[in-house]
Image (spheres, helix red, strand yellow):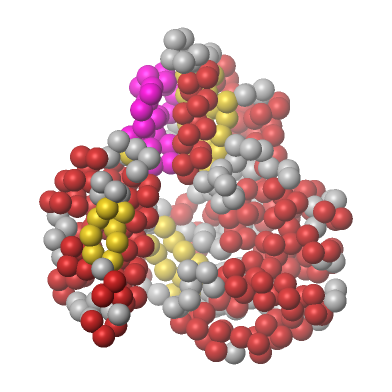
Amino acid sequence: MDRQQLLEDLLYAYYAARKHKRNTINQLRFEFKQEEEIISLCDEILTRTYTLRPSICFVIDQPVKREVFAADFRDRVVHHLLFNYINPVFERSFINDSYSCREEKGTLYGINRINGFIKECSENYTRDCYVLKLDIQGYFMNIDKNILLDKIDKMLLCRGDIACNAPADMVDYLIHEIVLNDPRQNCIIKGKRSDWDCLPPSKSLFHSLENCGLPIGNLTSQLFSNVYLHYFDCFVKNDLEIKYYGRYVDDFVLVHTDKAFLLSAKEEIRQYLSKECHLTLHPKKIYLQHYTKGIKFLGAIIKPNRLYIDNRAKHNFYLCVKGWEQFLASHSPQKNDILQMRSSLNSYLGLMRHFKTCNIRRKVLLGEAHLLFRYGYFTDKLLKYKVVKTYLNPKNL
């Protein structure tokens, strides 16, 4: 590949990777020597000497408890580089109802699609239909890397479609380096050993089988998780002939008028996942019920003609507000703290505007939040938090 073109591609990938990461130590360290780092990456990729650096491993509690392996920022740049090369090819293959980590899709899109499926299948709530919701147990931790590489190769057969005319051998090299990398090796553990105490083994890479598991959080892991189940999506849509089907990572929903048909489909799905993907349906997360009972999906409760936010999302919103109140009571916030507070509050409020949450917002924001009003105010019927401009000036803090 032309060296100048690769340098330009790396620079573009760097700008994408640093988005929302401008104040992290790794990003600032990379930015300090930006030109040197990008040239070094370029030469390593061209000479096939690039290797990933140790990841940082820690456990988070919100929105759910999970283990995260955070890649070094330098490796994040390469993740974005590879993503830019191969994602256009995959996007042309993915079904419309795979919602995770795709442009113009996401959780709200998925919720509205499933809501629409139920309405259409029940003929505007005038006839019976049933909803089957399934979940894959320990999905990311059980992805077989050899099977994944076969699926990637199969979907990238049309090499001419790869963006930027990236050479196939270079793309293959980066894919293998990233997929076959074991993030557990030489990883840096942050936090206490007790952080893992309540984490099920199925949710930790430290308990994964050899040559299995992708680290949660990496851009490439999100893309490859969609690739891994692409042929499963096609199996459900084409072989099982299920018109109303949608998937977000490892959660998927099927809607049909025949309850017995869905029970039969569940067993065929179980067998397919076991044989073709080496995956297992979660035995405690199988829900089959009449649409009038409501269905929980992606943080929403879907019922006829109405959408509600689920209890976990409500609780996390309450913890967010309470956490910032406690922080403001014990700290003198800096500009970055206030910007982060605004971002986290508006993230929840942006989600809640799509559901019937007026009473929830009033109760939490007007009943629990007091110090928040010292630095800003809520607009649009408590749907957006704005910071008073004077507090964005460090001299006023």
Point out the stretch of residues depicted in magenta: 287-308
Percent coordinates x, y for residue 265 in the rendering: 59, 23
- Quarter of the image that includes the C terminus: bottom left
| Nearer to us in this view, 395 or 127 | 395
| Nearer to us in this view, 179 or 391 | 391
In the shown orientation, is residue 268 left or right of residue 307? Answer: right
Residue 197 appears in the picture as rendered: no
Q: How many marks?
A: 0
Percent coordinates x, y for residue 365 in the rendering: 19, 52
- Quarter of the image that includes the N terminus: bottom right
Residue lying at 18% horizontally and 63% vertically, measured from the top left: 373
- Mainly helix, strand or loop, the magenta region? strand
Q: Farthest residue to the top: give it.
A: 127
- Based on the picture, tell me whether residue 296 belongs to the magenta stretch: yes
- Based on the picture, tell me whether residue 274 belongs to the magenta stretch: no
Residue lying at 34% horizontally and 52% vertically, measured from the top left: 348
Residue 307's place in the image compared with 333, above or below, is above
Residue 205's place in the image compared with 150, above or below, is below
Residue 81 sits in quarter: bottom right
In the shown orientation, is residue 299 left or right of residue 233? Answer: left
Residue lying at 25% horizontally and 46% vertically, measured from the top left: 381
Percent coordinates x, y for residue 152 in the rendering: 74, 52
In the shown orientation, is residue 49 left or right of residue 205? Answer: right
Residue 218 sits in quarter: bottom right
Residue 121's place in the image compared with 320, above or below, is above
In the shown orientation, is residue 10 left or right of residue 319? Answer: right
